[in-house]
Image (cartoon, rainbow, N blue to C red):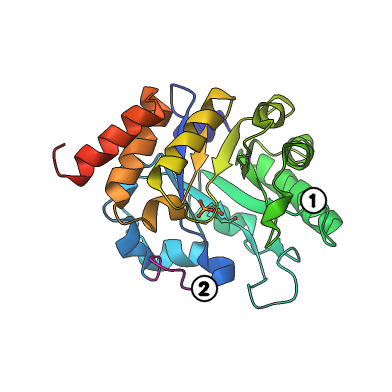
């Protein structure tokens, strides 16, 4: 367990996870139509890659030396009835065979499928702990993005940790994010959410989230859907691992964009 976790969370206690699992419920997402191409220039700056077994098998070079967080929940789609109605989609044997450093699945607290997703988490933890595989719970809101308040996120994170998640991924919220982190006994990483208007907004919320106790990010669209993915991931990495302020990150972003570094 410790060995796997230390592949994900670096010696400074921080982490930058790069998710490319979006196709599992929304199909060929913009700029992720060919995941193998999307990650080529940016994966070197990530601490781990989050994806499904299908993309891992078909789009990623098996020689890639980057820890994998395998998305193992699914079974719903954006055109289906309810995104919360997920099941576990990958066996433990497959998780081990694919040499995953961790697995991740979504929980949908407060939804019609709350009980199902939470007991799925508990069962996955039971199965994975036997083999020392950490489970990262994703506090998902489906299409209801307005749910992302500190009170709700704190509830979700705490429940996920109580059920045995080793890491929790949750959304950032401007008011009270520190309470979300304080109430969660395991490390919290910030999810990105839909692409923001400006790159600076991302630097601001990543910085603020880190100041309030997050250990890092699991951030996808605000990296690979941007015009300058390499500049974006390098600037975000600098906030996480080199304590850059949003201003310093913006300056690094501009320099990388201009090809000056
Ligand atoms: C949703 O749960 C997906 O698994 C993504 O991993 C997650 O939303 C983070 O990606 P993004 O930063 O694009 O929101």
Task: Quickly name the residue at label 1.
Answer: 109
Rendered location of residue 252, percent (x, y): 26, 34
Q: Nearer the viewer, residue 79 or 228?
A: 228
Which picture quadrant has residue 133?
top right
Indicate the secondary structure of the residue bearing disc 2: loop
Magenta-drawn segment = 28-33
Q: Is residue 108 above or below residue 254?
A: below
Indicate the secondary structure of the residue bearing disc 1: loop
Q: Is residue 27 above or below residue 250?
A: below
Q: Nearer the viewer, residue 87 or 225?
A: 225
Which picture quadrant has residue 87?
bottom right
Q: Closer to the N terminus: mark 1 or mark 2?
A: 2
Q: How far apart are the two marked residues, 1 and 2, measured between alpha carbons?
A: 24 Å
103 is within the stretch colored magenta: no
Task: Quickly name the residue at label 2.
Answer: 27
Q: Residue furthest front?
A: 197
């Amino acid at each position: 367990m410790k060995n796997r976790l230390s592949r994900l969370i670096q010696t400074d206690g921080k982490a930058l996870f790069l998710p490319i699992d979006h196709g599992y419920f929304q199909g060929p997402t913009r700029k992720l139509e060919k995941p193998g191409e999307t990650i080529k220039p940016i994966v070197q700056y990530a601490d781990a890659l989050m994806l499904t077994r299908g993309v891992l098998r078909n789009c990623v070079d098996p020689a890639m030396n980057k820890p994998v967080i395998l998305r193992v929940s699914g079974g719903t789609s954006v055109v289906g009835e309810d995104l919360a109605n997920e099941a576990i989609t990958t066996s433990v044997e497959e998780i081990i065979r694919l040499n995953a450093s961790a697995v991740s699945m979504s929980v949908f607290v407060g939804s019609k499928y709350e009980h199902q997703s939470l007991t799925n988490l508990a069962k996955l933890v039971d199965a994975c702990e036997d083999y020392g595989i950490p489970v990262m719970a994703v506090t998902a809101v489906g299409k209801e993005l307005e749910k992302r308040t500190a009170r709700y996120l704190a509830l979700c994170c705490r429940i996920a940790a109580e059920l045995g998640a080793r890491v929790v991924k949750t959304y950032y919220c401007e008011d009270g994010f520190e309470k979300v982190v304080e109430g969660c006994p395991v490390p919290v990483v910030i999810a990105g959410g839909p692409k923001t208007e400006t790159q600076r907004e991302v630097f601001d919320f990543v910085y603020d989230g880190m100041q309030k106790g997050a250990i890092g990010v699991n951030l996808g669209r605000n990296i690979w859907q941007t015009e300058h993915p390499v500049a974006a991931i390098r600037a975000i990495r600098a906030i996480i691992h080199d304590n850059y302020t949003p201003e310093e990150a913006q300056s690094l972003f501009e320099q990388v964009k201009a090809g000056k570094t």
